[in-house]
Image (tube, rainbow, N blue to C red):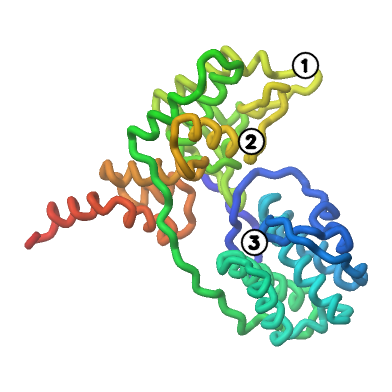
Amino acid sequence: MKAKARTNPNTRVASPSGTRRPAVPLRSLLPSIANHSADSAGQAVAQAPRPKPVSRFEGPVREFLSYIRVECGFSSATLAAYGGDLRDLWVWMVERKHRAWSELTADLIAEHLKSLEKRGMATSTIARHVATIRVFCRFLKTREHHDEDPADQLTQPQTWKRLPTVLGEEQVEKLLQAPDPDTLLYLRDVGLMELLYAGGLRASELAELDMSGVHFDLSVVRVMGKGQKERVMPIGLPAMRALRRYCEELREDLVREHAPTDRVFLSRTGQPITRVVVWQIVKRHAEKAGLDNVHPHTLRHSFATHLLAGGADLRVVQELLGHSNLETTQIYTHVDRSRLKEVLTKFHPRP
């Protein structure tokens, strides 16, 4: 069963991450301009003190962030990304003596994007800025903060599609065997990585998995993906055994009486782990196993590629991954060339 997110067709945009989220304080997404010392790509850069923004900019931005959180169901990570992109545009306009969003024009947007390029931002990061600005400008016109849509003719820059990093089956086994059995959180780490690979889950989906979403009798887990889309994932026996063992032998000891939680994966202090911690766990064990450039999404890529290599239908893999567009899933057909050659040889009348 899938729960469709409530969206406005005029403001729909792909969300780069999916989680079931609590309310996000909008103030935390709009830090003081004077204290702004990092660009929206997350890389620290030296910044001169910024002039204090006028209030006419702040109201529409807060209104927009609230809209995409409540109405569109965007994740906290997406809110932070959009807030950072709009903060960059906001600062840029203030520095040029503009006093309201109604003064934003297509020429100003073009100049702003050129300034991002001069700052050394990657094309993929600029592409996200473009997506943010397009949606925000449509919102400004809809809510009558602007007489027209200044980004109406703005197009997305072309970006190269990189093939995902995929582990071989032996490398996956090596990673799953990396945790030390003598460590306190051994059962948690094994169960966590087994579930990532067996279900192709995103780091955020695994971090926010609740015990109520785990069904050992059916060997399935229920997760909430991007855009508040729910999906039920069948999980293989090795992963379910590892997860059951963690829940029965370790999780109960981690839960604190003063702070009970329904989240499956907990820290040693009994707090629910975050998606950042999931990345750290996988990265730490990958380094121990001698594997480079491995993160939770690598296991998701490997899950999809191994399914296709084993003969799974592309549409089925699309459903399992929770992709809205089949084109997103098709990238995995380029990873396993041997599978394409096998299909061509088997089914083409003149191989």
Q: Around disc 2, counting alpha carbons within 10 Å, would you say few (fewer than 14), some (14 to 19), or many (20 or more)?
A: some
Residue 177 lies in quadrant: top left
- Point out the tag, 1 or 2, that comes first from the N-terminus: 1
State the image coordinates of residue 313 (x, y, percent, origin top left): 31, 49
- Name the residue carrying label 2: 277
Q: Quadrant of the C terminus?
A: bottom left
**Residue type indicated by callout 2:** Val
Position of residue 148 measured from the top left corner of the image (x, y, whole percent): 74, 85
Left or right? Give the position of 20 relative to 235: right
Specify which label sits upstream in the sequence, 3 or 1: 3
Residue at left 77%, top 82%? 104
**Relative height, residue 54 to residue 19 (above, below):** below
Compared across the picture, whether 37 is left or right of 301 comes to right
User: Can you tell which mark lies on residue 7?
Assistant: 3
Question: Could you tell me residue 68's position as x and y percent?
Answer: 71, 59
Residue at label 1?
A: 257
Identify the amino acid type marked 1.
Answer: Glu
Q: Secondary structure at mark 2?
A: helix
Disc 3: CA contacts within 10 A as few (<14), some (14-19) or many (>=20): some
Count of numbered marks = 3
* Residue drawn at 63 percent across, 67 percent down: 121
Residue 219 visible? The answer is yes
Disc number lying in front (2 or 3): 2
Looking at the image, the residue that sits furthest to the left is 350
Label 3 residue SS: loop
Mark 3 touching mark 1, by CB under 8 A? no
Q: Looking at this view, is 311 or 162 the one in front?
A: 162
User: Residue 284: x, y in percent?
Assistant: 55, 33
Q: Residue at x 27, y 41 (%)?
A: 310
